[in-house]
Amino acid sequence: MADIQTQKKQKEYEKYVKKVTPVHSLPLNMARAFLVGGLICVLGQWIMNVCQNMGMDRQMAGAWTSGTLILLSVLLTGLNIYPKLAKFGGAGTLVPITGFANSVAASAIEFQKEGQVMGIGCKIFTIAGPVILFGIFSSWILGVGYWLLKIVGVV
Amino acid sequence: MCVAEQAVGRQSIQFQNPVSIISGASIVGKKEGEGPLGEAFDMVGEDPMFGTNSWEEAESTLQKETAGLAIAKAGLQKWQIRMIYAGDLLAQSVASSFGIADYQIPVYGLYGACSTMGEALSLGAMAVAGGYAQYVLSITSSHFGSAEKEFRFPLSYGNQRPLSATWTVTGSGACVLGRSGGQAQIAGLTTGKIVDYGLKDSMNMGACMAPAACDTIYQNFMDFNRLPEDYDQIVTGDLGKIGQNILWDLLLEKGYDIRKCHTDCGLEIYDGEKQDTHAGGSGCGCAASVFVSYVLPKIRSGEWKRVLFVPTGALLSKVTFNEGKSVPGIAHGVIVEQKEEGGQS
């Protein structure tokens, strides 16, 4: 076990390393994320408008929008373009649905060599898994909350 | 026969009869071939898969080809190699196992993360010096694709690498060691301890390994009673830019200034600005290929007469990282000298 003196030394080293390690510029990264993320959303809105102009209702158009964005992201992942986009755009490419699709497609491509079941089957959600699990779990919690509020008669 | 004491100081060995480095061979990937050392490598593979179907197979092929090349350059047949000391970064060191299985040469598989070439050269030199083998082969490899898969994310997953991250070298380096031949020799060793300063950032491996490099270099100075000036160059493995600065600071604290005679394989192999590799290169193949293609030629030409080669390794796995453990470092020192004129050739 590390005694107090070692812990102190480790803390000092950590502080020192933090001082000498360069980091990406946060404002620049945020600006890029805003730009790329914003463009992806504009693209989504455009697809949505096109779909609605073709006579779809809002819900149907939404489904088509998500589907198209996912397809595009998967294609760009397969062509190895999405990682370059993500290097520039950071969270701007991570947060929209395209980021999720990229993480699933990338895992599928990488682990396909290990077989359909043990490779793709087991490992396709290596990165996206937590999002799915905790996403569903939190929506369940919200559902329970909604149900309770309904019983009490608030909503 | 009486064996003279060859252990010096606390962690070092000074060979009574230095061990010859008969030949060296290196094969690297395309990106490394485009780097500043591009011309110096024996071969540059244009295909990242090296004609195979997976990253792991690709790395095995890389290692197999490099081993064959080193043996051929030494003018030997493969049956003359008594044993191989081999290692890589993959779990259970599979790149080595599958790579050199076909040769049917006795083999010791090693793991010392990116410091493995230091380990392979040390153990190989000991085997030769001890009279257990006339010729041994020391070899390591790493591959960007297989390392990313092993330690980080699938290759086509989009993310931003921090500036402190290093780029795993696709490459392999091999040396044939023996009792005589060649123009370079291993004169001594300093075996490294595992040094842990408690850092947990696996994306800043230079900072995790610098304390280990400092420890080994300092111990080497103590054990051999030397100063930085006694070496024409001290060459660390893959500390990168940040790790190099930390190493300098740590050694300055101990009263040694190595800034004038220090370089790092991770900094030599890429042009950090142009090739966008961030802190530098890393991986077992980094120290090995740079040693063979950059350090050895300089020793042969006489530009450097004595070099302290210190490959560095970060001893982590995905599991220990996820379980919140720190990233301990290790570094092995190998003293490489030019053979004196009139010596055996």
Image (cartoon, rainbow, N blue to C red):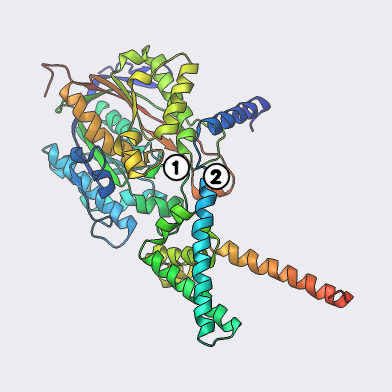
Residue A26: numbered disc: 2
Image check: B200 left or right of B104?
Answer: right
Quadrant of the rendered image containing residue B331 = top left
- Residue displayed at 48% across by 44% down: B162
Q: Quadrant of the C terminus of chain A?
A: bottom right
Task: Say if mark 2 contacts mark 1, CB within 8 Å.
Answer: no
Which callout, 2 or 1, points to the residue nearer the camera?
2
Disc number for residue B137: none
Q: Is residue A114 visible?
A: no
Q: Quadrant of the N terminus of chain A?
A: top right
Secondary element under disc 2, as helix, strand or loop, is helix
Q: How many marks?
A: 2
Residue A41 in the image: state x and y as whole percent. 53, 66
Residue B29 to residue A105: above or below: above
Which sits in the foreground, B298 or A52? A52
Question: How far across and how far down the image is residue A22, in percent?
Answer: 49, 36
Amino acid tagged 2: Leu
What's the distance in space between the residues labelled 2 and 1, CA to CA? Answer: 17 Å
Q: Tell me the chain of label 2.
A: A
Residue B68 in sight in this render: yes
Q: Residue at x 80, y 75 (%)?
A: A147
**In this view of the protein, which residue sits in the foreground, B193 or A130?**
A130
Nearest to the observer: residue A27 or residue B15: A27
Residue topped by disc 1: B165
Residue at image coords 40%, 22%: B217
* Direction from residue B260 to residue B133 in the image, left or right: left
* Residue sitting at the far right: A152
